[in-house]
């Protein structure tokens, strides 16, 4: 890690300058004007032609309307293994579900799960592979596990001297940087690196940062090539044409995910087991709201969700994302704080998962101490300014 607490003193001296480091005003982008890395076949096909290829992919890996695997097979690319992250290759597994190895029913290619107890490709998995391709649609939030999968794939490729091509995709939450920076001792699969909860980088830029900051074990360095996007800038609000995972079905859920996913570390439901996950939140005893929902198991989306079959009362945030021009570019803590105040006298509000999601024990302590959202946000600013300086070294897009 190249930035340490020893540099914090420097940033105390330049806090007055931080106003010039804020995020640009977002603009709604037309996804059709953005050319993804996967679409730029001419840039990476010469690198994989006549090679034995491994590919990390899921349903979001499209070339136009064709899956990347199918596209490459029509070009006679020799795909040896498919590696699937959380949610599986076909995207029919819910968050956290154990995914077994097997063979793809359509192509017959071996599929290796990179989740559960096997998050990192082994030497045997990579045997006979000459080059790897990584193509996943990230959502730009630290605890969304695709960047952890990316890190482990980079590490495995570095160990086996296998080049890695990252086909870049736009970050739908790439227009701002916010949240607590992960602290030492809180690293896990839902947050490996000292980055904010919302880090404002594409997955290709993030790969460059992992390499450049020396975050691979034992000083390893991955032989990395990023196929850049065309027509993308960081102030774009990008509405994805496909859902990146089963419980993020639309733009509203992706936009609200950085704020509402913190509820996963509490007794509150975020609507898993409904048609609007990560657009609503509630609890059976949260009775001061007229809105209600009842979670049920949904095959491939949510198996035995929190409060299955019980009526939960809370808030429906559908429409909040559409007012992005009025809403500030930041994580909203007010929902979490107000719900804690409502439920904590009767219940133990937080569970052991919350500190992993937050990447620190401070946020929990601050909420329990009754600190205001404004004061909590102030406590992030020095770390965020340090991160922005590091981030700037790896940005590929304005």
Image (tube, rainbow, N blue to C red):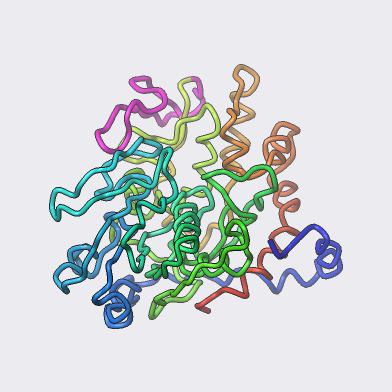
**Residue 305 position by quadrant:** top left
Magenta segment main secondary structure: loop
Give the residues in magenta: 285-313
**What residue is at 66 percent from the left and 53 percent from the top?**
181
Where 183 falls versus 139 (above or below)?
above
Numbered-mark total: 0
Q: Is residue 305 magenta?
A: yes
Q: Decide: is 257 above or below 157.
A: above
Q: Quadrant of the N terminus?
A: bottom right
Q: Where does residue 337 sit, x and y in percent of width and height?
A: 63, 36
- Would you identify the image quadrant in which residue 135 lies? bottom left
For the point 26% across and 49% down, the residue is 111
Residue plotted at (32% across, 29% down): 303
Q: Is residue 24 left or right of residue 316?
A: right
Q: Nearer the viewer, residue 58 or 324?
A: 58
Left or right: 332, with 243 as reference point: right
Asked whether 202 falls inside the magenta stretch, the response is no
């Amino acid at each position: 890690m190249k930035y340490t607490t020893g540099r914090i003193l420097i940033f105390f001296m330049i806090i007055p300058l931080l106003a010039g480091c804020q995020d640009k005003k977002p603009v709604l982008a037309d996804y059709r004007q953005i050319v993804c890395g996967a679409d730029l076949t001419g840039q990476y096909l010469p690198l994989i032609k006549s090679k034995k290829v491994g590919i990390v992919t899921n349903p979001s890996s499209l070339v136009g309307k064709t899956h990347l695997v199918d596209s490459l097979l029509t070009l006679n690319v020799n795909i040896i293994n498919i590696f699937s992250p959380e949610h599986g290759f076909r995207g029919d597994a819910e968050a956290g579900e154990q995914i077994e190895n097997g063979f793809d029913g359509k192509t017959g290619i071996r599929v290796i799960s990179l989740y559960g107890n096997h998050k990192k490709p082994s030497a045997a998995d990579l045997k006979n592979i000459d080059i790897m391709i990584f193509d996943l649609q990230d959502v730009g939030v630290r605890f969304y596990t695709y960047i952890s999968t990316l890190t482990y794939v980079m590490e495995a490729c570095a160990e086996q001297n296998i080049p890695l091509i990252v086909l870049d995709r736009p970050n739908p939450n790439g227009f701002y940087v916010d949240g607590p920076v992960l602290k030492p001792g809180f690293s896990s699969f839902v947050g490996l690196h000292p980055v904010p909860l919302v880090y404002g980088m594409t997955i290709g830029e993030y790969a460059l940062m992992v390499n450049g900051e020396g975050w691979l074990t034992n000083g390893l360095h991955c032989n990395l090539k990023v196929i850049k996007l065309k027509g993308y800038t960081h102030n774009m609000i990008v509405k994805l044409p496909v859902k990146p995972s089963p419980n993020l079905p639309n733009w509203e859920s992706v936009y609200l995910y950085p704020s509402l996913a913190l509820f996963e570390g509490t007794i509150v439901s975020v609507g898993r087991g409904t048609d609007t996950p990560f657009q609503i939140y509630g609890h059976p005893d949260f009775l001061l709201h007229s809105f209600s929902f009842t979670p049920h198991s949904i095959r491939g989306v949510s198996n035995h969700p929190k409060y299955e079959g019980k009526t939960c009362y809370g808030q429906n945030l559908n429409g909040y994302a559409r007012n992005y021009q009025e809403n500030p570019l930041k994580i909203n803590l007010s929902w979490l704080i107000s719900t804690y105040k409502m439920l904590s006298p009767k219940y133990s509000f937080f569970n052991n998962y919350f500190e992993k999601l937050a990447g620190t024990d401070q946020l929990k302590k601050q909420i329990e101490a009754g600190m205001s959202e404004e004061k909590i946000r102030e406590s992030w600013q020095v770390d965020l300014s340090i991160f922005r300086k590091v981030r700037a070294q790896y940005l590929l897009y304005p």
